[in-house]
Image: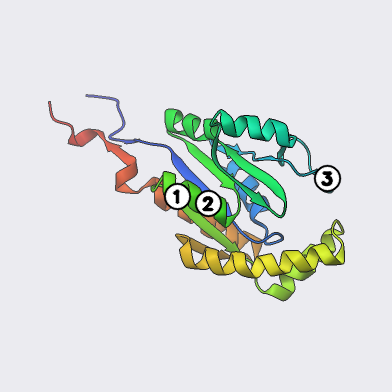
Amino acid sequence: MSSERPVQPARGLLLVLSAPSGAGKTTLAHRLIRDTPGSTFSVSFTTRKPRGQEKDGIDYRFVDVKTFQEKIERDEFVEWAEVHGHFYGSCRAVVQDATARRSMALFDIDVQGGLAIKARYPEAVLVFILPPSLEELERRLRDRGTDADETIRKRMLAARSEMERGAASYDFVIVNDDFERAYSELRSVLIAERCRRERLELGFMRRG
């Protein structure tokens, strides 16, 4: 009797989380990575300076414009864009690794980047995280204590646009009004997508 499991993952899972700044997507992303053995968190490259307690290689990979441009020329990004005067990009190697290991790669990026990944990899799963309200979002941004009033006003304007685009174009929408409930819903999306027939290799259906 064969000891091979009848169902095996046939391909990697690309999971994109997007949200306006302050909605809590990064906290959700890191919790999901911690609870999902073998998964990979895509640390984006950016040309902006670190904010607050951000650390290079953990929150972002901080590089200068010249280095970023060289990576574009070498086709090292699966997606990249200019946002608020700074460049951001997701490393192609993360996708290649997830595909080779048939594991999950999680991207914590904006809607523009998420849709770029979806256009290149239609099987990618896009999840948008909404704050309970714009008032709560502004309160969270102010509580950080890292941005000036003008910066917060710009972030709130950008948040409205981001929320409209994300809610209209993403596969799933989760409201982060209670962290544990939001995380449970995010975890449920992952479990369901891992069981999607197209992602599985059904060994018992092979002939011979």
Kind of residue at disc 2: Gly
Quarter holding the C terminus is top left
Q: Mark 3 or 1 closer to N-term?
A: 3
Circle 2 packing at 10 Å, graded few (<14), some (14-19), many (20+), is many
Q: Nearer the viewer, residue 173 or 2?
A: 173
Most distant residue in the left direction: 208
- Identify which residue is drawn at 52% across, 57% down: 127
- Identify which residue is drawn at 39% across, 47% down: 123
Q: Nearer the viewer, residue 85 or 143?
A: 85
* Residue 18 picture quarter: bottom right
Kind of residue at disc 3: Gln
Task: Name the element at disc 1.
Answer: helix
Instruction: Tell us which disc is closer to us: 3 or 2.
Output: 2
Instruction: Tell us which disc is closer to us: 3 or 1.
Output: 1
Task: Name the element at disc 3.
Answer: loop
In the displayed structure image, the side of residue 91 where residue 5 appears, left or right:
left
- The picture places residue 147, in percent across and down from the top left corner, at 84, 59
- The picture places residue 106, in percent across and down from the top left corner, at 55, 43
Mark 3 and mark 1: Cα distance apart in space: 31 Å
- Dot 1 corresponds to which residue? 118
Mark 2 and mark 1: Cα distance apart in space: 6 Å
- Dot 2 corresponds to which residue? 114
- Dot 3 corresponds to which residue? 53
Q: Are marks 2 and 1 in contact (CB under 8 Å)?
A: yes
* Residue 141 picture quarter: bottom right
Task: Name the element at disc 2.
Answer: helix
Kind of residue at disc 1: Lys
In the displayed structure image, the side of residue 57 where residue 192 appears, left or right:
left
- Identify which residue is drawn at 76% across, 44% down: 48
